[in-house]
Amino acid sequence: VPPQTAPQSQPALVFTLLRGLARPIFLFSSARSTLHPAKMAPWSIEGCTVDDAAALGRNNGAAFWDQPMWKMMWPEDKTREYLMEQLTKRLPMRLLRNRDIMRHQKAVDAETGALIGYARWELPEGSKVAPGTGDPEWLDAQVPDVGADQWRAFEELEASSWWEPREDMGELDSKNEAIQDRILAERPYIKLDYLAVHPENTGRGIATALVESGMREAEKMGIPIYIFAFKSARGIYVKLGFKEVDRLVQDDSAFGGSGDYGVYFMVYEVAPGAAR
């Protein structure tokens, strides 16, 4: 568990949104500076299934509901409950799409069995099969597939959702995406794509445990990790061993922001001699 925790008055998470579901979301709390196997903790890190959609909707929706960027993205008449309901409708397909490269993890409370945190990872193309096994890489974080009938039902459920964030903030995203595309084109990376912990559970080291779980997998695969981080989270990833490779600070005041929209592009290098 991290030696310090962020004050409860600080936001738990900062993010920017894409039209589909949500763009990289990163929770922040204090974190350890070295990577090591997890000690006994009051939670476990497990893979997700489509049955987790409702719990993920509650966890993820609550995690970013009070964040300024989230407020900027939606009409004021949309309530938290309504948006969480729409998010939940979309999650089964979000879990099922691109199963070959997407990996989903949840933190589960050991006493209650409740879902208390979530991380989504994207493997690089070409790392779909673990050497010597014939199984997909990081198999325990690959969401199990469903039958054709259930797949169609989930597609219909997703199509029934309302999901219309504002579309006039593209100039902010386009500059960030240009830097990200350049970095990802340089070599293969595992991308930490989404990280969320319910506000009631922040400060317990759950986000750190989820990130460190992915770091251990990266060491096994011999593939570095890339993250698209925000100002409030930067120091935490530095403590975990991530290095900043680029940054961009933009003025978002025209869209209702604070005017200091900072993005930090960070990489975790695997140890020399790691697998592959």
Image: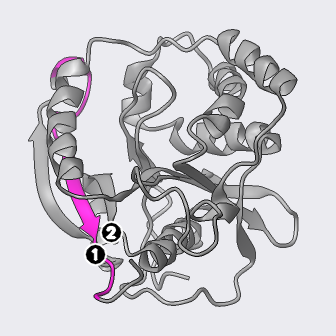
Residue type (three-letter) at the residue carrying disc 2: Pro
Can you tell which mark lies on residue 269?
Answer: 1
Quarter of the rendering occupied by the N terminus = bottom right
Between residue 257 and residue 128, name the one nearer to us: 128
Give residue 136's position: percent from left, percent from top.
61, 59
Quarter of the rendering occupied by the C terminus = bottom left
Between residue 4 and residue 28, name the one nearer to us: 28
Report, in whole angstroms, how far the alpha carbon at label 2 lies from the one at label 1: 5 Å
Residue type (three-letter) at the residue carrying disc 1: Glu
Give residue 251's position: percent from left, percent from top.
12, 31
Does the magenta segment cover residue 216?
no
Between residue 269 and residue 86, name the one nearer to us: 269
Secondary element type, mark 1:
loop
Between residue 205 and residue 94, name the one nearer to us: 94
Secondary element type, mark 2:
loop
Q: Residue at x 17, y 54 (%)?
A: 186
- Decide: few, some or many residues near mark 2? Use Cα within 10 Å; few <14, some 14-19, many ≥20: many
Task: Say how many tags the image has.
Answer: 2
| Label 2 close to label 1 by CB (< 8 Å) | yes
Give the vertical position of 230 relative to 172 (above or below): below
Location of mark 2 (residue): 224
Dividing the picture into quadrants, the one containing residue 127 is bottom left
- Residues in magenta, as a range: 254-272
Q: Residue at x 56, y 45 (%)?
A: 63
Give residue 56's position: percent from left, percent from top.
69, 43
